[in-house]
């Protein structure tokens, strides 16, 4: 799997988890609203960085890739933590 394919897979996985949590929050789990709003800000940042990555130079892309990995892992852990608390 190349870096672009791997990044798309991670984004798809995070998007799916995000959508599931958004639905559960909408259905009445409002106690997580503040944490969710902070995660949404990070999600928007991640999406905007990924959209611009294709236009950046190779060196900048490596930096974005490293930042992507850290932020994606942080989001994934937070989503899993919230999902576990919602169950």
Image (spheres, rainbow, N blue to C red):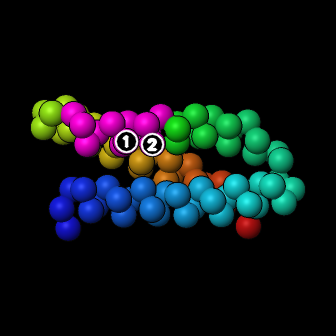
Query: Element at badge 1?
Result: helix
Start-end of magenta stretch? 45-56
Q: Depth check: 27 or 84 in front? A: 27
Residue 32, image x, y percentages: 75, 45
How many other residues sit within 10 Å of disc 2, few (<14), some (14-19) or many (≥20)?
Answer: few
For disc 2, the marked residue is 47
**Dominant secondary structure (helix, strand or loop) of the stretch shown in magenta:** helix
Residue most toward the front?
55
Q: Residue at x 76, y 61 (%)?
A: 24
Residue 77, image x, y percentages: 51, 52
Identify whether 63 is placed above or below 22.
above
Task: Give me the C-alpha separation between circle 1 and circle 2.
Answer: 6 Å
Left or right: 75 in relation to 29: left
Asked if the residue at tag 2 contacts the one at tag 1, i.e. Cβ–Cβ closer than 8 Å, the answer is: yes
Q: Nearer the viewer, mark 1 or mark 2?
A: 1
Residue 54 among those drawn in magenta: yes
Left or right: 66 in relation to 31: left
Query: Element at badge 2?
Result: helix
Residue 62 among those drawn in magenta: no
For disc 1, the marked residue is 51
């Amino acid at each position: 799997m190349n870096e672009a394919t791997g990044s798309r897979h991670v984004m798809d996985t995070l998007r799916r988890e995000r959508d599931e949590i958004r639905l559960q929050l909408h259905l009445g789990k409002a106690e997580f609203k503040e944490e969710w709003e902070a995660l949404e800000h990070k999600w928007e940042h991640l999406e905007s960085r990924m959209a611009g990555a294709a236009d950046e130079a190779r060196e900048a892309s490596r930096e974005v890739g490293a930042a992507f990995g850290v932020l994606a892992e942080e989001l994934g852990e937070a989503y899993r933590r919230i999902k576990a608390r919602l169950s």
